[in-house]
Image (tube, rainbow, N blue to C red):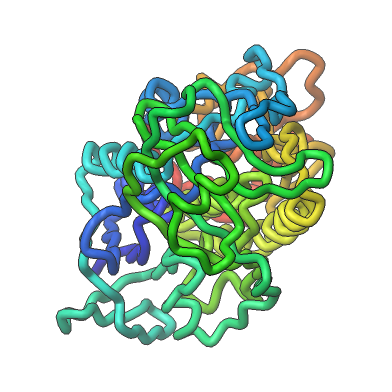
Amino acid sequence: MTHVLIVGSGPTGLTLAIELARRGVDLRIVERSAEPPTGVRGKGLQPRTLEVFDDLGVIDEILATGSGYPGIRSYKGEQIVWEGRMDEPKEPSPGIPYPNLIMQPQWRTERILRDRLAELGHRVEFGTEVTGFEQDEQGVTATLGGGETVRCAYLVGADGGRSTIRKQLGVGFAGETYESERMLLADVKTGDLDRDHWHLWGSMEEQVMYFGLCPLPNTDVFQLVAPYTGEDDLRALVTRHAPHVHLDEILWRSDYRANVRMAERFRVGRVFLAGDAAHVHSPAGGQGLNTGVQDAYNLAWKLAAGSAALIDTYEDERMAVAAHVLGLSTRLHRERDIERGDDTNQLDLAYLGSALSVGERGGERLGTLFDEQRGTHFLLLGATGREYGDGIRVLPPLDGQEGVILVRPDGYIGYHGDESGLSAYLSGFGIDAPLTRASS
């Protein structure tokens, strides 16, 4: 029996698959589309996501093929009327090794993640749709498009905002679709603009944008973003506002309505929702893709451990985060705020109040010892007593640390307190024995 069946092969599904594969969990990942996507949708990778990608073993290629965001140049016709940046580049520090937002076309992010998954012995099954499923106390039986049935312990719907898994679960998707705010995306080529700036036409003072052309790193392509007015002639749209810019080629285009929605549940029995299947955001602030990666990073180690008490914490932890991030991205969308920084980098997100977070620092991101965290194990800082399982790496305490600190595999503090209470915490969440098989 397959332990986990993942439906959807975007960044969320791929992150989940890699995390499970690193732990030796039997999995399948299926994708309804016949081939990988080519168009650019999400392109911003936040600092917290870069920390996750470091742990997954893909950060070197992500950084080598991506770039920081360029400066912004705003025009009226051919005249430059404003220049600035979304944020000022920062230097790495011990607590924030990746301080800057990285631009990386989503198709390339997915390709890098697929390659890493292949190194771990698994591949996406393209052209494979889940047409139905039933669950019972022991597992889930899913039916694929070709008539094959798959028996699995857990099923995860990471199949996007129009998720068939969510719909088949009957889970509501509360929120709002901004019917009057349709946007146009396109991948285009032009030789009339430099590739050192993000070029915008409109009024920065009045926060009105006609369109923007952003150079995508290590390509000869620009991403065009504009309000959709029903006009299908992209070349005419560009020429009307910027007569000196001519599109040489249109590679891909799509239009969409801004959505702000969240599922009423992230779990029904043995079936889970993650990424856009659980929450969709406006594009403002670059939060959607990144929040989905964090969903997967939270869920994977819990499914691998198999402890019911651990798995029960997924919905509570991630729904609270998703609600917060939806509020942030909605505010940025309404205010047309292009600045980025501490509010959007996801470094301050925490699991305060979770049943899994105990003690003064319980639920916080550790924010140090990144080399020591890399892998699938827990870190235990400052322990002096009993022996712990192979999946728990014991290290000396931090400077000034009081009590012991147990750091979860996803980098957040689970337990902070006296070592005498640690055994009860570990056994209460089934952490001690099930993770002794963990490896890097």
Residue 111, given in percent of the width and then of the height, sits at: 30, 41
Quadrant where the image shows the C terminus? top left
Q: Position of residue 321 (x, y in %)?
A: 70, 54
> Tag count in the figure?
0
Judged left or right of residue 126, residue 90 is: right
Q: Look at 51% across and 68% down and name the residue there.
A: 161
Q: Quadrant of residue 181?
A: bottom right
Residue drawn at point x = 78 percent, y = 46 percent = 207
Quarter of image, res 408? top right
Return the residue nearer the eye: 43 or 144: 43
- The quadrant the N terminus occupies is bottom left
For residue 92, side relative to residue 130 (left or right): right
Give how far across and how far down residue 392 sits, in percent.
51, 34
The residue closer to the viewer here, 335 or 175, is 335
Q: Residue at x 65, y 69 (%)?
A: 262
Given residues 364 and 224, the one toward you in this image is 224
Image x and y of residue 156, in percent = 43, 66
Q: Can residue 92 be seen in this snapshot?
A: yes
Taking 118 as reference, is 220 above or below it?
above
Residue at x 73%, y 61% (from the top left corner): 323
Res. 421 in view: no
Task: Name which quarter of the figure residue 35 lies in.
Answer: bottom left
38 above or below 78?
below
